[in-house]
Image (spheres, rainbow, N blue to C red):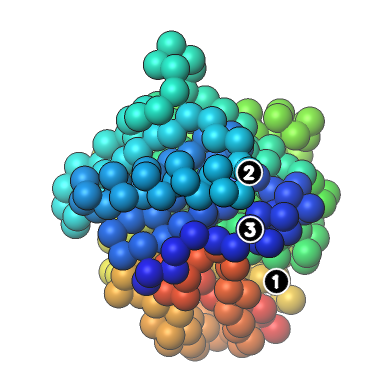
Amino acid sequence: MNFGWIDPGLLRDFQAEATDAYRLCTIDEGWVERFGRDILISFKRVLARERLLAELQSWTSSVGFDLGRIFARFVPRKGEERAPPRLIVGDPGENLQTIATERHLKFGIDFGTGYSPGLFLDQRENRRYVRHITPKRLLNCFAYTCSFSVSAAYVGAATLNIDLSKKSLARGRENFALNCLPTIEHRFIADDVRAVLPRLLRKGEKFDVIILDPPTFSRSPGGKRFQVEHDFENLLIDALELAERGSHVLLSTNCSTLREHALEVMARYCLKVARRAATSHRPAQLPDFPPGAGASSIWLTLR
Ligand SMILES: C[S@@+](CC[C@H](N)C(=O)[O-])C[C@H]1O[C@@H](n2cnc3c(N)ncnc32)[C@H](O)[C@@H]1O
């Protein structure tokens, strides 16, 4: 996975498409991301953090990149606590927020609220695809800060956002506001996705795009566990009942045991159970991510 630093030509491509949030470097034991003017170093060992910091400083001066603050976060091993990033270069008196731009859309970034700052860069191609297919009604399960919905709303969709976290949905609303998108056509439900999908089915709701990007593991306030390897199948079977003909369904996960092939096998099984037919495709490889890094995703197109 020693991908190294991205090509300066790619920096120019991102600038030309009005994107300032992307991965700058990937090595075996860490990676570096840009969010607007700020940088986030993710490291598995302190030695990797020190190496990435030193390389960042010489790389930015060689490509003429105007460096803002630098944050760093430790990437925990399985089962270890996730801590928010720490400021390592910059003014500690400044607030911990900034704004990142992706293809002219703005997203609020907050280095102080938790391990993840608010925008998953490995979903950039999937957000682009959402804009490309111009949904009318998008269902965003595990919506987090609603980046998929903002992308869909920008091209005219109404969206329904479900997430356990009220705070993440509030940040989602702020992302709509940042882009001057009124939220009148958009619904935000703070609840367990598994409880909401059957309610939507009873009400006869249908969607033409459904986003399923669950976490590897979570626990709802009532103590109910979600484990992606165990629960993704049932989630997809329920979601398929809400998908209208010709709709698109994204299956995406960071779980290392569920790569694209496993998602395709699972999708075939769920389609059979739900008596639906679909074609599937994998999104284009991101130019700033080495193959195999980031989330695994497939898109289904239902018949
Ligand atoms: C991997 S993030 C989703 C990222 C999002 N798709 C994006 O691209 O920005 C996982 C989100 O799922 C939410 N979550 C976890 N378990 C949930 C559940 N059972 N029902 C609803 N939301 C859940 C978390 O609060 C978190 O915001």
Near mark 2 (Cα within 10 A), the count class, few <14, some 14-19 or many ≥20, is: few
**Residue, x 69% and y 48% (percent of image)?**
19
* Dot 3 and dot 1 residues touching (CB under 8 Å): no
Splitting the image into 4 quarters, where does residue 185 fall? top right
Q: Which mark is residue 8?
A: 3
Residue on which the image places disc 1: 247
* Spot occupied by residue 39 in the image (x, y as percentages of width and height): 48, 39
Indicate yes or no: mark 1 CB to ligand 1 under 8 Å: no
Near mark 3 (Cα within 10 A), the count class, few <14, some 14-19 or many ≥20, is: some
Q: Residue furthest top?
A: 93
Determine whether the residue tagged by mark 3 lies in a helix, strand or loop.
Answer: helix
Q: Nearer the viewer, residue 83 or 71?
A: 71
The answer to whether 9 appears left or right of 16 in the picture is: left
Q: Which mark is residue 64?
A: 2
Determine whether the residue tagged by mark 2 lies in a helix, strand or loop.
Answer: loop
Near mark 1 (Cα within 10 A), the count class, few <14, some 14-19 or many ≥20, is: many
Q: Hey, what amino acid is under mark 1?
A: Ser
Which numbered disc, 2 or 1, marks the residue that appears first in the sequence? 2
